[in-house]
Amino acid sequence: MSFDIVGFLRNHTLLHGVPETELENAASTMETVCFPDGEWMMHEGEEGNDCYFVLDGKVQVYTRSLIGKQVVLAELGYGALIGEITLIRNEKRTAGIRALGEVTALRLDRTAFEKLAEASPYFHESLTYAAELRMKHGLLRKASIWSAIPDSELRGLAEITVRRNVLQGENILREGTPKESFYMISSGRFEITSTVTRRAVMETGDFFGEIALLAEQPQSATITAMEDGELLVMGSAEFQAIWQHYAPVRRQFAEVMRIRRPDLAITHSFGAAEGDEIAPDAEHDLLPESPIRSTRWIDLLFLLGGLFAGCTVMAVWLQNQIWQMAALLAGGLVGPVTFVAYIRGSQQLGFSHVRLAWVFVLSAAVAIPLAWVVERQWLFGVARSTAGFTELSVPLSVALIEEGAKLIVCAILLRGGRMRFLMDAVVIGAAAGMGFAAVESMFYGWSYLERGSTGEMLAVLWVRALLSPLGHGTWTAIAAAGIWLELNRRHAAQRTRFVRQRQGLAIALLLAAIALHALWDFHFVEGLWRLLSMVSVGAGGLLLLYVLLRKGTKEENYAITALNPLLQDEALNEADEANALKAKPLICGACKTQSPRDARYCARCGQALRRKL
């Protein structure tokens, strides 16, 4: 049974007014094509010289977001024209299209398409307008802050959004000028300079202009195009209407304000409707942890533990200096490195391994010499107490000196504006503490090795490795949390209203860390009771650290989900693609933070995330 192509074209709404002869000429070049279920009719990014009218069945239109996820843009059925954007704009395919069930389509090549467009101005104008809307809708869906808006509303948003081409060197906004519009970057790179904030570079998916609109203040930064690019521009009234209508959008921009301008976030309220703000401490579903991140510390434990065990056997067997030194290094590192890896694995907005290694080494290079000099000069000099660590004043002094030395490193690192989470302090504190502990263990082991006692050196290293989670890393993580609370309390005034309690908690954490350290070193009992007392003190420290980890994880979770409202609901369509993406960490190009694999915006700096596939 033949299909009446001319009749189909004559009755199509886009082709009204096209002369019959032109329809017949176009029909003579067209062919009916069948696609089985799941077959790709066209792929995003490829060259295209044809388009299709859907005659039977349905198709799904896909694109890829900046993080590599497949995003469904539309589901189209009978009469839909697909692939026309490539022919109108002479560009590569902007989306992929796959058959949803068996599909029959009418293929139209470029030549016939162009003849139809010439024969009917209405056809050309309608397609141009529809293509423009589809382009803007696709950009808004895959690379914009509006992910929380329903797709039907997003199509309406595309109608009121204007595309604007910009040239290299063009100033989009100037600091101090009145509020204008809301801007989203669809292509190009833009430099942000300000007297208030540091220099930054924004790219596709990033946005600006919201601070002036929300705070009712002049522009807080100057935005300059670093290269030719394109912006999606939304007027102030339209932006305010959408912001007021959707609670998830209000939470998104409230979090953006806390990131970009915490000073304004304190003095202005951006939760227009009651119930918009969800307290970071509130109970809500946590994001699923990446299996790669959560088990890495186990791999390190087996690797370094096996290395230490092997070096121990070889050092005892051969009594060789090389193996003794290898055992000394491995024994000093196995516990501290594994502990830091475990704490970092609890962090949803993870620091890079290079940064943590730098903190580890910096603490060893700065805190150890500083503590050694101060202790030898003031505590263990000529007039030192004969009672040693059996007198509380000695371990208390050691705790004050050593924690103070480590916290100097932590305080310097935590002063940065991007250290906005409690987990940042806990992880940095753990790395600083364990850098100190690793070198201290090596010093203790070396002192026994100098006496010619390989067995005693190895015994000390094994005991300290096993007990390392109870010591320096835990204490300094707790103390660093206190430092962070004090440094950041002014940014929490609007959210908690408990500044004094926050300051009191900071002091309590510092005192707790010093007390735990002092009690650990205090020799008030001997023998087995001494070991039990150390384990009890260590268990108390781990319990307090666990509480901080839980609180810090909830705080990170709140920020991530506020900025990425659909994070928990998004799922990839192909299981093998999901497994491939799990294996690749999602690193923010601006601040180098590792984010959850499906996040679109970095909860530390607020910029769009991009995955290099």
Image: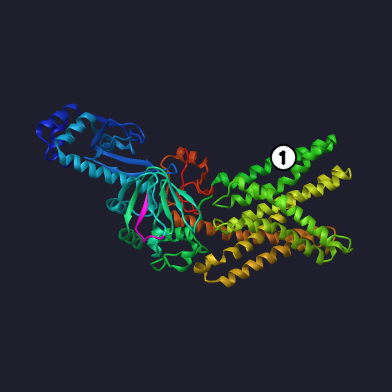
207 to the left or right of 373 = left
Residue 438 in view in this figure:
yes
Residue 2 in view in this figure:
no
Q: Residues within 10 Å of mark 1 (few under 14, many from 20)?
A: some
Most extreme residue toward the top is 28
Q: Which residue is mark 1?
A: 306
Which quadrant does the N terminus fall into?
Answer: top left
326 to the left or right of 259 = right
336 to the left or right of 607 = right
Residue 12 lies, with reference to residue 345, above or below; the image says above
Q: Quadrant of residue 531?
A: bottom right
The image position of residue 489, as x and y in percent, is 56, 66
Q: How many marks?
A: 1
At x 63%, y 54%, the residue is 428
What sort of colour scheme is used for the picture?
rainbow
For the residue pair 297 and 431, the one nearer the viewer reads as 431
At x 40%, y 54%, the residue is 208
Residue 594 falls inside the magenta stretch: no
Label 1 secondary element: helix
Residue 66 lies, with reference to residue 318, above or below; the image says below
Q: What's the residue type where badge 1 is placed?
A: Gly
The image position of residue 21, as x and y in percent, is 10, 31
For the residue pair 341 and 100, the one nearer the viewer reads as 341
Residue 590 lies, with reference to residue 507, above or below; the image says above
57 to the left or right of 46 = left
The image position of residue 465, as x and y in percent, is 74, 49
What segment carries the magenta color? 176-184
The image position of residue 367, as x and y in percent, is 72, 54
Residue 179 falls inside the magenta stretch: yes
